[in-house]
Amino acid sequence: MENLLEIGKIVNTHGLRGEVKVVPWTDSPDDFCDVSFVYIKNKNEYKKLTIDGVKFQKNNVIVKFKEYNDINEILPFKNAVLYADRDDLGELPEGVYYIVDLIGLKVYTEDDEYIGEITDVFNAGASDIYDVKRDGKKNLLLPVIDEVVKSVDIENGRVTVNVMEGLDDEV
């Protein structure tokens, strides 16, 4: 199940017929319309569930699974993370990456100086931020903007950046 990506979390039940309210972790909640199956991790096994219906409610997605038709059957899955097969999610636009693919990439300056390793990616409103762990220094937070991130090479595990003045006094 190496090809699975987290796409959301069940936060509650919805109604009495087995629907669940999901907080999507994808850039577009419409991704739930593109997949036929999702997986829920139960202990150390993944259970495959068939998506039978998708509705949208504010920032959440209401999902109905073919396998469950009653609130009491689906209730144990509250707070469960949903996974989808990477191949089912389609191609990402150029310059867009899955966070799981960015974690662990080595970060270098344009002069080929090693800075550290990406340990997290989070959104700060205007842009995403790469959290770069460095040896013996505090983490460096790099905004994912064209002026800073010059190239991302997933295949070779490398990100090249321009650490602009003011981002870090220790580089």
Image (cartoon, helix red, strand yellow):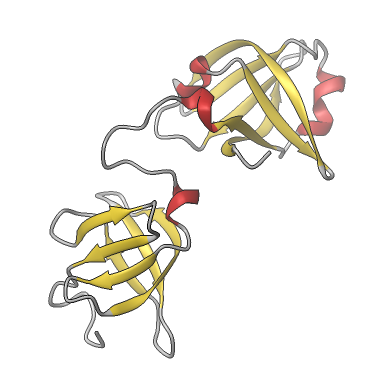
- The N terminus, quarter of image: top right
Query: Could you tell me residue 104's position as x and y percent?
Result: 47, 63
Query: Could you tell me residue 140's position as x and y percent?
Result: 34, 74
Query: Could you tell me residue 76's position as x and y percent?
Result: 84, 32
- Vertically, is 114 above or below 91? below
Residue 72 sits in quarter? top right
Q: Residue at the location (41% across, 54% down)?
A: 122
Of residues 22 and 89, the one nearer the viewer is 89
- The C terminus, quarter of image: bottom left
- Vertically, is 37 above or below 22? above
- Vertically, is 81 above or below 145? above
Q: Residue at the location (39% across, 66% down)?
A: 131
Residue 46 sits in quarter? top right
Residue 61 sits in quarter? top right
Of residues 4 and 29, the one nearer the viewer is 4
Q: Residue at the location (50% across, 20% down)?
A: 57
